Amino acid sequence: MAEAVLRGARRAMETETVMKRAGEATLEDLLGCHGLVIGTPENFGTMAGMVKDFFDRTYYPAEGKTVGLPYALFVSAGNDGTGAVMQVDRIATGYGWKRVAEPLIARKEVTDADLAACEELGEAMASGVALGIF
């Protein structure tokens, strides 16, 4: 799913797009970005531990510095994905971020339709950032 988002984002030629695993992403990455697409599996009804770790490492140092940052979310879920979505949305609200697309949730297995939706999400996010829509 992440690679599909990246493919879509790279179709928007006006932007530089970077993909990082949550454990590799830094405060500097967060402060330097103009938009963020977060991807996570749903583990036991919640986001992945490394995504939570990213939030834990960056929340207080970034406090007040990323207000209004556009973000989107995709979830690969063995269940319904709503637990992961609710948790990420709650944390994003604390940062003051603005969700700019409905979360994409692939339930049980990732289909070709899910991957196509991820590509569309990536392209829409990158284009929206480049055009100043978000």
Image: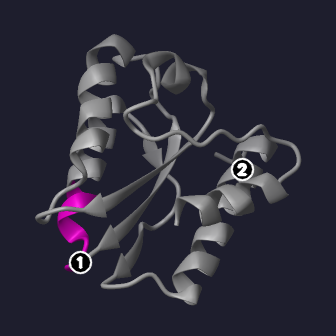
Magenta residues, dominant SS class: helix
**Separation of marks 2 and 1 at Cα, in angstroms:** 28 Å
Query: Where is residue 33 drawn, in percent x and y?
Result: 60, 29
Name which residue type carries label 2. Ala
Identify the mark at residue 78; answer none if there is no mark.
1
The structure residue drawn at horizontal position 21% and vertical position 44%, both measured from the top left corner, is: 49
Query: Where is residue 1 drawn, in percent x and y?
Result: 52, 67
Left/right of residue 36 with respect to residue 26 in the rendered view: right
Quadrant of the rendering where the C terminus is positioned:
top right
Q: Is residue 6 above or below residue 70?
A: below
Name which residue type carries label 1. Gly
The structure residue drawn at horizontal position 38% and vertical position 74%, both measured from the top left corner, is: 105
Viewer-proximal residue among 60 and 75: 75
The structure residue drawn at horizontal position 23% and vertical position 78%, both measured from the top left corner, is: 78
Viewer-proximal residue among 3 and 91: 3
Residue farthest to the left? 44
Q: Is residue 12 above or below residue 76?
A: above
Q: Is residue 94 above or below residue 111?
A: above
> Mark 2: few, some, or many residues within 10 Å (few <14, many ≥20)?
many
Viewer-proximal residue among 97 and 83: 83
Which quadrant of the view contains residue 59?
Answer: top left
Left/right of residue 24 with respect to residue 50 in the rendered view: right
Query: Where is residue 24 drawn, in percent x and y?
Result: 44, 30
Which numbered disc, 2 or 1, marks the residue closer to the eye?
1
> Mark 1: few, some, or many residues within 10 Å (few <14, many ≥20)?
some
Query: Where is residue 56 drawn, in percent x and y?
Result: 23, 27
27 in magenta: no
Report the magenta residues as a range. 79-86
Q: How many marks?
A: 2
84 in magenta: yes
Identify the mark at residue 126; answer none if there is no mark.
2
Identify the mark at residue 107; answer none if there is no mark.
none
